[in-house]
Image (cartoon, grey):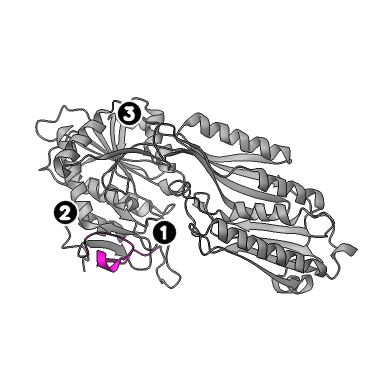
Amino acid sequence: MSILKDMEPGRVFHYFEEIAAIPHGSGNTKKISDYLISFAKSRKLDYVQDDMGNVLIRKPGSAGKEEASPVILQGHMDMVCVKDADCDLDLEKDGLRLKVVKRKDLPRISGAPEDLMVTAEGTTLGADDGIAVAYMLAILEDDSMVHPPLECVFTVDEEIGLLGATGLDKSLLKGRKLLNLDSEEEGHLVVGCAGGSEVVVSLPVDRGTRKVDIYTDRVIAGIRIEGLSGGHSGNDIHKGKANANVLLGRFLQGLMMDHNRQIRIVSVEGGTKDNAIPTDSSLLVSCEEEDMEYIRGMVENENDVYHLEYRDQDPGIRLTVSFQSESEYEQKTGTQIVPLTESSARKLVRLLYTLPAGVQNMNPEIPDMVQTSLNLGILRTEEDTVKAVFLVRSNVNHEKEELVRRIEGIAAEQGGSINIISSYSAWEFKPGSQLTEVIRECYREQYQEEILVETIHAGLECGIFTDEIPEMDAVSFGPALYDIHSTAETMDVESVKRTWKLLLSVLGRL
């Protein structure tokens, strides 16, 4: 039974529902890529499917626009798959369970109470960027619409590093105007975005010998920083939210200052994704029983400091400690405690305490706009290495590169090194965009107000296209989506309808 059959525009929601029935998480896009090819074949449209699964579908211009310059419509087919703990769906194999709710049932979202919203039961919705795919399919199937020749580009694995857009052969594209449909704020026109680099800092560490007197009858202290609100490392980096990994380094600096105490670091852990501000982190140290009160005092004192410092942004923040004997810990976990040597511990503390974090530079021309930042998203301790994973962002390419070099220099001072896992260029704002003026005009006519033209401190695929095709005129816009990448993700039905009307108006003028 169709859940969205009464929603308008009908064909847009028809295709969104079909997409939702196909598993299409990042790294699991073959089925949806093949679905797009079947769509193109059934309508005798020209298509290309590359080895990555990216799909390009071409459609000639409508009557009178056959010789117009081609326009690229673009979005990504993969979604972030997250589900609630009690959800029984296997998102590698199962489709989503869509449902329609009223805005009044979502008190965190303001607006008219009776407005309809689409969401999913217990999972992410995938409106980022399934709605772009639905828009393009609805346009491709309808021969009554007015539009120039179209090149509809559906990319894979955007959510894990813009991989599909990076791997796409851009020589396939004739168009030099790009409408990216991957923005989630209606009334906002994005004309620039940050570039990013995933940087892994590796610090070699030594553990010495286990069976020596210093480690006899000792205690393991498990220290946790948790209860943080987290957020997106681009969109939320300027909001003053606490980063659990950064606070862990700060706590370690204070804890290890008393060199007369026999406190030894065993491991540091925190975060799960480089592009998410980490909400929790943990520290294991080996200590003597007489040090327990000292550690408790440190935890209580820092708890008070954190609550005062982050009382508005992270009111749930808490620092806790638990103790057990080393023998109990080893028996419970099946692992032997071998702490870092004092030399390695000092290097680790200095590294974590001195590495930069958060906002580094603000845009001098756009008020309240972050220009350059970095997020310490992941901390991991291995047998002989501690790894710290950063996502470095900047809307100016040379500032991103300079910040990466700074991380490299700080790591080298402690005997560490860096590895750049992925990197993509910033989409730098270019004045004089014809696309921007056309959209502003169409928006003004439809809404009787001005669209907000802005750059964002997050990554969009536009930067990949404009980097390889410098003459490309690109913009990004889309309908109102809320709480993307979470199980609370919702899509505003009326906003989808208004944005559809705007999109068709723009295509009719190009």
Q: Is residue 112 magenta?
A: yes
Q: Mark 3 or 1 closer to N-term?
A: 1
To which quarter of the image does residue 471 belong? Answer: top left
Q: Mark 2 or 1 closer to N-term?
A: 2
Amino acid identity at mark 3: Met
How far apart in space, not on screen, are marks 3 and 1 (Cα)? Answer: 32 Å
| Left or right: 356 in relation to 179 | right
- The span shown in magenta is 93-113
To which quarter of the image does residue 21 belong? Answer: bottom left
The quadrant of the picture occupied by the N terminus is bottom left
Mark 1 crowd level (few <14, some 14–19, many ≥20, 10 Å Cα): some
Residue 500, position as x, y percentages in the image:
19, 47
Dot 2: element: loop
Dot 3: element: loop
In the rendered image, the vertical position of residue 132 relative to residue 462, given as above or below:
below
Residue 508, position as x, y percentages in the image:
14, 36
| Left or right: 475 in relation to 67 | right
How far apart in space, not on screen, are marks 3 and 2 (Cα)? Answer: 30 Å
Q: Is residue 434 visible?
A: yes
Is 210 or 317 nearer to us in this picture?
317
